[in-house]
Image (spheres, rainbow, N blue to C red):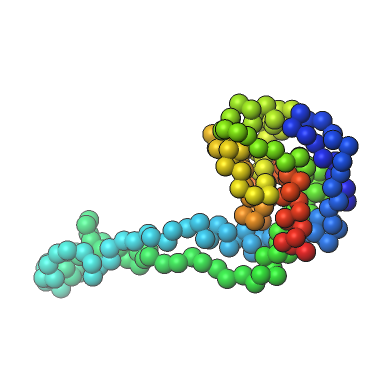
Amino acid sequence: MKLDVFNIQGEKTGRSVDLPDEIFGIEPNEHAVYLAVKQYLAHQRQGTHSSKERNAVKGSRRKLKRQKGTGTARAGDIKNPLFRGGGRVFGPRPRKYTLGLPKKVKRLARKSALAAKAQKGQLFVVEDFSFDAPKTKAYVEILAKLELDGKKVIHVTADKEENVYLSSRNLPKAKVMRAQDLNTYAVLNCQTLLLSEGAVEKIVETLS
């Protein structure tokens, strides 16, 4: 598969990049993608949720009333979960949500996500560029010339481009990330994947 390379003016440069079929031309494996997304979302959870159960609530252990003969339900101490201020029944406890996933499955999931984007025509390649200083206005103009303004875009760079990243940070629908940080969820969670020429080489090198 070949894709034309655009410049920051939104014009074709006359060059093209060759996208290997073993990465961008495979049949997407939906189950691998599901597992990778599930793992990513699970790892975003802090797992710090906590609540006080009956043994952690402050209060007397004295029995409130006699067991029988009151005409009402039997009750133990003031920490009874049925009372206001009582303990929580089976409340959440701090835990880890990490999930294990084989490297080959994660690699297959990324290939499947990239192949799906390529097959839908949601993959664009732009020549490498950088800014001398953070310029959000300039970055917006580049997206407009590429006809990507208003779309949810993930711009993948080969290496860390601090000024390009800072230029896009205030844009709610644009995000800049390095090729080595690209994951399955990020690929699926955008309308258009904008790859720099250098990023294509990094992705091919990583997933080959």
Name the foreground residue: 203 vs 160.
Answer: 160
Q: Residue at x 81, y 43 (%)?
A: 121
Quarter of the image where one finds residue 162: top right
Q: Residue at x 84, y 35 (%)?
A: 13
Query: Looking at the image, is 24 positioned above or below residue 107?
Result: above
Q: Residue at x 64, y 62 (%)?
A: 36
Name the foreground residue: 81 vs 56.
Answer: 56
Q: On the rendered structure, is 12 left or right of 106?
A: right
Please state the horizontal and vertical placement of residue 167, each as a whole percent of the image: 58, 34
Furthest-front residue in this view: 132
Query: Looking at the image, is 16 positioned above or below residue 94?
Result: above
Q: On the rendered structure, is 51 left or right of 104?
A: left
Quarter of the image where one finds residue 151: top right
Asked if one can make out residue 61 in the rendered structure from this viewpoint, the answer is yes
Please state the horizontal and vertical placement of residue 173, each as a whole percent of the image: 61, 36
Q: What is the number of callouts on the image?
A: 0
Please state the horizontal and vertical placement of residue 95, each as a whole percent of the image: 41, 67
Name the foreground residue: 107 vs 65.
Answer: 107
Q: On the rendered structure, is 111 left or right of 180?
A: right
Quarter of the image where one finds residue 99: bottom right
Query: Looking at the image, is 184 positioned above or below residue 97?
Result: above
Please state the horizontal and vertical placement of residue 7, each as a whole percent of the image: 78, 34
Asked if one can make out residue 68 in the rendered structure from this viewpoint, the answer is no
Q: Residue at x 13, y 71 (%)?
A: 61
Query: Looking at the image, is 192 positioned above or below residue 48?
Result: above
Which quadrant holds the C terminus?
A: bottom right
Q: On the rendered structure, is 206 left or right of 6?
A: left
